[in-house]
Image (cartoon, rainbow, N blue to C red):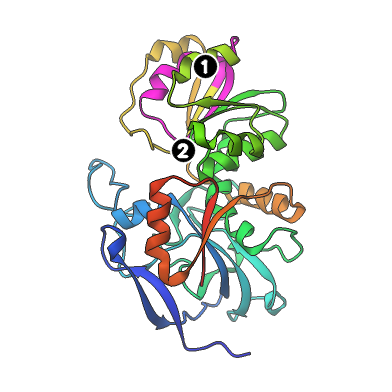
């Protein structure tokens, strides 16, 4: 079956609200020599899509400047970082054995070829993403998951949310037997943290809203802390000797109030700022108790390889909250912004 010349894609031409997401006919991208063309079967919707669309990431020295994930965006931009699909074409330097294989794309753009490289760009922000019927990606960022028991939707749920979660867990040195605090536990990254930490043999204390507590508990949390009540007091009751690691996507005031909960030599890992990016804490609690504050942005190539091994084994089961056709991408983003759901929202191009 030949690849068509045109496709349907959802893209943004400027920063703004959901109204700037437009569905258009566009040329099918041609893969470069070291790239593959993937027919998109499922693409997940993430907070990164909302914030990139809004231009909410700011710039160094100018936190209010409109920008994508790592800087100004080259418009128009096809959004979507999380792709599961089928390889239909490879560039001149590619292995044609990949054609026909079911794959997941690592959406990160790295600063080097090292296994521990830092992500400095993202599909859907610094390059076109998967809100389209076809997407290109470097062949070394494509992972064959043909044998995975997970569905296309579940595989598409993995890259950003579970990649970010695994990066936090690895950078935080989480080990079996630890007691960890997970904030924002009903969101995409939060639920991934609960599942991945539980699979590692960790005691998970998860912060969530009351109506979502059962879903978070079902995902593997040992205890669910109601964020509407005094979170700090609840943690102290559940872990009177303290926590080993906080896995935090909320930040804000919780950091300053929560750092004293961390045991000697513990870590507070931050990968989001849903509660605010201005943070203050008593620095004495940091140096007197050898506590580390760890910033964690997505994952490394090695973390992503680990995640794909988890996917091939079906060791986690992503929860799918809703499915939308591609031409309703704006509506899918609006549902994500309302935060009434548990799990991932996906689009079907």
Which percent across, then down, holds residue 141?
59, 62
Which dot, 1 or 2, sits closer to the camera? 1
Label disc, if present, on residue 234 of the rendered structure: 1
**Camera-side residue of 336 and 163:** 336
* Residue for point 61% across, 50% down: 319
The residue depicted at 59 percent of the width and 10 percent of the height is 240
Q: Residues within 10 Å of mark 1 (few under 14, many from 20)?
A: some
The structure residue drawn at horizontal position 53% and vertical position 52%, both measured from the top left corner, is 344
Q: Tell me the CA gap for discs 1 and 2.
A: 23 Å
* Residue 263 falls inside the magenta stretch: yes
- Horizontal side, residue 119 vs residue 15: left or right: right
Query: Magenta stretch?
Result: 239-266
Q: Which mark is residue 271?
A: 2
Residue 320's image quarter? bottom right
Q: Position of residue 275 (x, y in %)?
A: 37, 33
Q: Position of residue 160 (x, y in %)?
A: 52, 51
* Mark 1 or 2, nearer chain start: 1
**Does residue 161 appear left or right of residue 61 in this picture?**
right
Residue pictured at 63% horizontal, 73% vertical: 86
């Amino acid at each position: 079956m030949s690849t068509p010349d045109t496709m349907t894609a959802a893209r943004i031409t400027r920063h703004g609200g959901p109204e700037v997401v437009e569905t258009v006919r566009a040329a099918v991208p041609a893969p470069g020599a070291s790239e593959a063309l993937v027919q998109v079967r499922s693409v997940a919707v993430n907070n990164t899509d909302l914030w990139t669309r809004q231009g909410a990431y700011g710039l160094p020295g100018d936190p209010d400047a409109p920008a994508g994930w790592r800087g100004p965006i080259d418009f128009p931009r096809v959004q979507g970082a999380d792709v599961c699909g089928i390889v239909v074409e490879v560039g001149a330097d590619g292995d044609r054995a990949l054609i026909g294989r079911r794959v997941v794309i690592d959406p990160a753009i790295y600063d080097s070829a090292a296994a521990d490289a830092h992500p400095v760009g993202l599909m859907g922000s610094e390059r076109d993403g998967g809100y389209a019927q076809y997407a290109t990606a470097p062949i070394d960022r494509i992972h064959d998951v043909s044998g995975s028991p997970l569905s296309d939707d579940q595989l598409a749920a993995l890259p950003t949310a579970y990649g970010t979660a695994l990066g936090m867990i690895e950078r935080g040195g989480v080990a079996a037997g630890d007691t960890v605090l997970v904030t924002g536990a009903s969101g995409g990254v939060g639920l991934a943290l609960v599942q991945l930490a539980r699979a590692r043999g960790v005691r998970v204390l998860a912060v969530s809203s009351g109506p979502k507590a059962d879903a978070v508990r079902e995902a593997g949390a040992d205890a669910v802390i109601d964020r509407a009540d005094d979170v700090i007091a609840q943690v102290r009751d559940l872990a009177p000797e303290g926590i080993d690691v906080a896995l935090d996507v909320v930040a804000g005031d919780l950091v300053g109030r929560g750092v004293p909960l961390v045991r000697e030599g513990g870590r507070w890992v931050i990968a989001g700022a849903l509660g605010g990016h201005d943070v203050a804490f008593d620095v004495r609690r940091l140096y007197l108790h050898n506590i580390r504050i760890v910033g964690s942005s997505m994952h490394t190539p090695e973390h992503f390889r680990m995640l794909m091994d988890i996917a091939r084994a079906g060791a986690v089961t992503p929860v799918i909250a809703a499915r939308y056709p591609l031409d309703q991408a704006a509506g899918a983003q609006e549902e994500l912004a309302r935060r009434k759901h548990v799990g991932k929202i996906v689009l079907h191009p």
